[in-house]
Amino acid sequence: MKQLQEAGGNTIRVWDTLNLASILDSAQANHLAVIVGLPLPPSESIDNFYNTPKADLYRKKITGIVERFKNHPALLAWCLGNELSFPYKPKYNSFYKVFNGMVDMIHKKDPRHPVTTTIMAFQKKNIISIKLRTKIDFLSFNIFGSIQTLKQDLEDFKWFWDGPFLLTEWGIEGPWIAEDQNAWGAYIENTSTKKAEQYLSNYQKYMPVNNPRFLGSMVFYWGQKQELTPTWFSLFDENGAETEAVKVMQYIWTGKKSTKKVPMLRYMLLNEKGGKDNIILKADTVTKSRVYFDNTDTTLTFKWKILEEDWFKPNGIFSNKKPKEINNLIIRQRGAELSFKVPDKEGPYRILVYVYNKSGAFATANTPFYVLKKP
């Protein structure tokens, strides 16, 4: 939170209700406002939640949270549910009854703070249902690649919905675009340097900053988050070191360019090949990886990791568990070059590198590869 305040940010959204007291206190100490997320099960959970006594018990818990924190000076708004769907069909009436009951409860208990909910991208069907069947105060979007059409989407649909909106998640495109996969379905992640360029470009080209309905935007993800990889959306590492994207956000928020130096990592090669080259390696052999930079800095330090790739996606969602790191494979490291032993187990892997400078800022790159016993 201190780094956010120093970079010019002013608001966070959190979903941690267990540690909410300390989060709000810390936010206040750092002059930040908080949108408090109140999680709800998916609207499809009709038979095991919305049509059962569980919903009433859950409502009591949410009521307790609202009553406890409604007067905290750091509180800005409540966000009821994340990326719920808002269907038309009558069988979802019980979902709307529970949802609107909670909105009414918050409005009654805490009339000073508005209520929002988030939807994934600009989906007209959801917007129609939210306007016609709910009582929220403003709408929030979690939007990534589709931010490119947001300005036009807002203009084309304002004849029906012309309310205020907030972007509660925006950033680089995520690991879900088919053309960013290789032959066995591994997603290709850009370097942190390239991602920093994309954050700035996306904001400058597509953010609807001149729309009078626009309440603001919240970059995703201010911290470290495991989603397919440990680095895809992370603007920090686990210890709080900053990527170049933090500098970009400071420039966006303040108009002032940071003087902090960050390694400018352009690409990684594994066996002289890139991530899209479908790299297949033979088990128990020795291979090399190297990273290349725009700037020269002899004081850089390198941290390499070789991880088992996790393909399992229950309900289409990437596991948030740390992938298994394979140890004792590194044979020799010399600057930006690494020699390592290929794992002896067949399957998909990914090699990652974290490159730190003396000030603690870092850059990252990674490359997927596949191991066969007899390629």
Image (cartoon, rainbow, N blue to C red):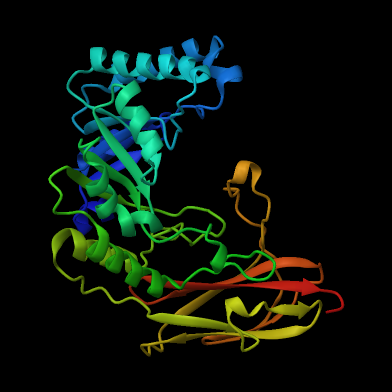
- Measured as percent of width and height from the top left, residue 114 is found at 22, 27
368 or 140, which is in the foreground? 140
Q: Is residue 240 above or below residue 286?
A: above
Q: Decide if residue 61 is on the left or right side of residue 70.
A: right
Q: Is residue 292 above or below residue 362?
A: below
Q: Decide if residue 281 is on the left or right side of residue 57.
A: right
- Measured as percent of width and height from the top left, residue 174 is found at 47, 58
Q: Is residue 39 above or below residue 262?
A: above
Q: Residue at x 39, y 74 (%)?
A: 194
Asked whether residue 61 appears in the rendered view, the answer is no
Q: Give the quarter of the image for residue 52.
A: top right
Q: Is residue 313 above or below residue 101?
A: below
Q: Residue at x 21, y 74 (%)?
A: 259
Q: Give the quarter of the image for residue 329.
A: bottom right
Asked whether residue 162 appears in the rendered view, the answer is yes
- How many discs appear? 0
- Measured as percent of width and height from the top left, residue 375 is found at 83, 79
Identify the residue at the far right of this view: 374
Q: Decide if residue 31 is on the left or right side of residue 49.
A: left
273 or 137, which is in the foreground? 137
